[in-house]
Amino acid sequence: MKTSKMTAIGVVAWILCAGLVSPGSAAEFYCHPGYEAKCIESDQNVEKLGEWWQPKLFTHNDDISSIRSGGQDWMVFSDANFRGYALHVARRDLPTLVGNYEGGLNWWAGDWNDRISSMKRL
Ligand SMILES: [Ca+2]
């Protein structure tokens, strides 16, 4: 009796803890502005988007145009292996990367549309 009660408490505690440490929704990266044509969903680092193969042998390097962070803290980079220009997405949703020049990009280097080559979860 006592053992089963403790087991029940343990199960409830485990469920509560699992809920507290839940990572939340994975971040979603879209190939078009306005969260259209989702190309990648991830809650882990992506070092080389060029090697992130999708069905039909399709890669999404330099292809991302909008981001839903899923409440996660992300940094995206213009080059593979977290190099190049960096855009701190933070926990924001970015409906379009067209015209976004954050993180050192400028009119001469271009905006963030179709530039991302790696992503890091902070
Ligand atoms: Ca790039």
Image (spheres, rainbow, N blue to C red):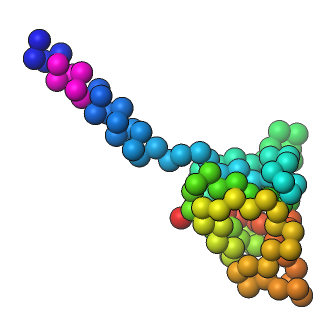
Quadrant of residue 33 within the rendered picture: bottom right
Q: In the current view of this chain or complex, which residue is farthest to the top?
A: 1
State the residue at coordinates (82%, 63%). 96
> Residue 16 at x, y = what percent?
34, 36
Compare residues 8 and 44 and report the one nearer the observer.
8
| Residue furthest to the left | 2
User: Magenta span covers which residues?
Assistant: 5-10
- Give coordinates of residue 122: x percent, y percent: 53, 64
Q: 90 above or below 55?
A: below
Q: Write the residue at 79% across / 79% down.
A: 101
Task: From the top left corner, tell me how far across and down residue 26 is, in percent.
Answer: 62, 47
Q: Which residue is at 69% across, 73% downward?
A: 87
The reply, left or right, for residue 108 in relation to residue 28 is right
Residue 58 located within the stretch drawn in magenta: no
Residue 34's image quarter? Answer: bottom right
Total label count? 0
Quadrant (top left/top right/bottom left/bottom right) for the N terminus = top left
In the image, taking residue 76 as reference, residue 73 lies left or right, namely left
Q: Nearer the viewer, residue 32 or 115?
A: 32
Residue 9 located within the stretch drawn in magenta: yes
Q: Is residue 109 left or right of residue 46?
A: right
Residue 30 seen by the camera: yes
Secondary structure mainly formed by the magenta segment:
helix
> In x, y percent, where is residue 108?
89, 87
User: Is residue 115 positioned above or below 69 on the image?
Assistant: below
Compare residues 54 and 100 and report the one nearer the observer: 100
Which image quarter: residue 3? top left
Can residue 85 be seen in the rendering of this structure?
A: no
The residue lying at 29 percent from left, 26 percent from top is: 11
